[in-house]
Amino acid sequence: MALVLRTTSQIIGHHAELEKKSAEGYGALAERHPEHQDAFNRLGDENHRHRARVERAYRLGVTDAFEVGFTPNPLDPGDYALEEFTGESLSEDLDTALRNEETVIRFCLDAAKTSGKLLPDLPDTFDQLVRRKRKRVELLRSLT
Amino acid sequence: MDSGSAKELKVVDVMVVLEEPIKGVIELKNYIDGEWVESEASETRDVVNPATLKKIAKVPVGHREDVKAAVDAAKDAFPRWRRTTPLSRARYLMTLKQLLEENFEELGRVVTMEHGKIIDEARGEVRRGIENVEMATGIPSLMMGYNAEDISRGIDEVLIKQPLGVFACVAPFNFPFMVSLWFMPYAVATGNTYIIKPSPWTPLSTMKLTELIDEAGFPPGVINLVNGEVEPVSEILENPGVKGVSFVGSTKIGRDVIYRNATSHGKRVQAQCGAKNFLVVTPDADVELTVSSLMSSFFGNTGQRCLAGANLVFVGDDQGFMEKTLGVIKERAGAIKMGYGLEEGVQMGPLQAEHRKKRVLGYIESGLKEGATLTMDGREFNCDPYPETCFLAPSIFEGVNLDMTIAREEIFGPVMSVLTAEDLDEAIGMVNSSSYGNAASIFTTKGGTARRFQYDVECGNIGVNIGTAAPMAFFPFSGMKDSFFGDLHGQGKDAVDFFTENKVVIQRWP
């Protein structure tokens, strides 16, 4: 069975999963590259805050009167898979981290578009996250 | 979503069901005078999860003596509670609100388990309930009266709003957590004491709510819970200690039992009843927005809500527009995933009980016999791996006219009846021909059309490009004709007025 994200709850859940995985990745990078430990730990902490931010927006805005269960454009979680950090150098790991950030940004953009029909406050929250994540991309680039 | 649930939210190619908060079979008790006590009735009814058919609780059928004890406790608590300052009463509600937030996820899952609705809808219900608690915390302002100085030389006149005593609500099965919160927070915020009688089909969310009420530290007797069926309701309606009753349910019970009996015993009543809601679509409507709203309105909560869409009316002779819109609706309705609401990808749960499904099936038979065309047959579905007993997929009837039973009576299930009207006048006439007046919506991009609709339609809740016109906590949940009996509605300022008496003081000081 091909599984797609049809409901708001699924979209929020998958976002949480992506942020968690991303944070775990930065935890691993902090150990492998102690010279940038602070930066990677900060990025990991941010992941948890981003997850909490979306969950809060959902919890405070959810209402059965809107179309929480009926997204017309389901998302495929397979389109947003994060890569493992298998690089042999800082430069390779940073490339992976950048690709993962772009994947999460793409998910947030798609979720914002889809959730516009689902729940009024969610698109704004996802859009705000995208702005913050683009700053993370700049930070990662500065580490190379 | 609690932080500990992250691993449960992983989406992979397997069925993922959120953890059930109810384990085993709970034996329900009443909560009277701050204590959990057994009912005087020995007979019980099983509470069953309609998706899995697992028994999750046993609820007593209830006894008049249960209500008498609750009324006595509430009467005893009233003098002290009304003297508690409005600000202090609001602080109890603030504590309750905080506890509800902390238990948000569990409450949502309990709603899904006992009712069957999907987890998003259940969380939405919990949120709407909490909003009423939030609204009632504003009682120090909401309860203010007004005054006029020098109505005659040296004489002033003041209006004071005062509580009356003990109030009660008889709540329905379809929003087991939310509905008692349309009333109770306002009642206790204004200084009254209260008795909640939940539906015996879905009593668990109210039990969880009452556990949090207890934890919030409300004084004994201020809020009481009595489970049961007919006998407790009869006692609520007849007991002279109960000053007013709030009810949500069918028109037959609301009008013929609740309203008549309670008013004949001198009580205040607000009875929010059945519905047959028309959703009118004009050819200029935005198809994408309209279809998304229609899906939720007709099939959300498996059609079991008094604001659900029932009759879909296409205005004008643009056959192409109608066919295109219906085509998209059918495509989406056909793709709805049915199953257990705690499975996150599920979009529609079961009906709440087998007899409710049989009732809907009866209406589908009736539609066929009376000549409507069943273009989507919800009797054919797949809800694997769950038992089919309470499930029913969306059904769509076309070629429906107002003489047909399916166009006039409340079905309370996922059934859409499609009608056509030559013009807006005819569509408004159709809406107004209904004995009900709960809700109606129009989908249009023309302001003049929308204004005309909202002006002329005889319904209490109007949606403009909104499929489910559910009023927020700070507005009354309105309703007209056979959809409401009483004067003041639930929620908002109406609720404050319902639970208070206006006392006028004219004073002169020598």
Image (cartoon, coloured by chain):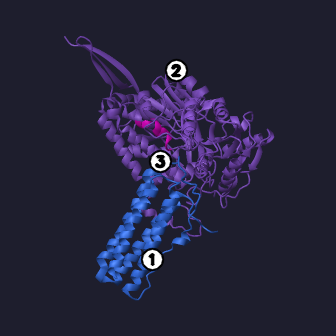
Find residue B265 and name its label: 2
Q: Secondary structure at mark 1?
A: helix
Query: Subunit of mark 1?
Result: A
Q: Nearer the viewer, mark 2 or mark 1?
A: 1
Res B282 → quadrant: top right
Q: Which chain is purple?
A: B
Q: Nearer the viewer, mark 1 or mark 3?
A: 1
Residue at the spot of label 3:
B126
Label 3 to label 2: alpha-carbon separation = 34 Å
Label 2 to label 1: alpha-carbon separation = 72 Å
Please name the predominant secondary structure of the magenta segment in the image.
helix
Q: Position of residue B315 (x, y in %)?
A: 67, 40
Dot 1: within a 10 Å radius of its alpha carbon, few (fewer than 14), some, or many (20 or more) residues? some
Q: Amino acid at mark 2?
A: His
Q: Position of residue B141 (x, y in %)?
A: 32, 33
Q: Is residue A24 magenta?
A: no
Residue at the spot of label 1:
A99
Q: Which chain is blue?
A: A
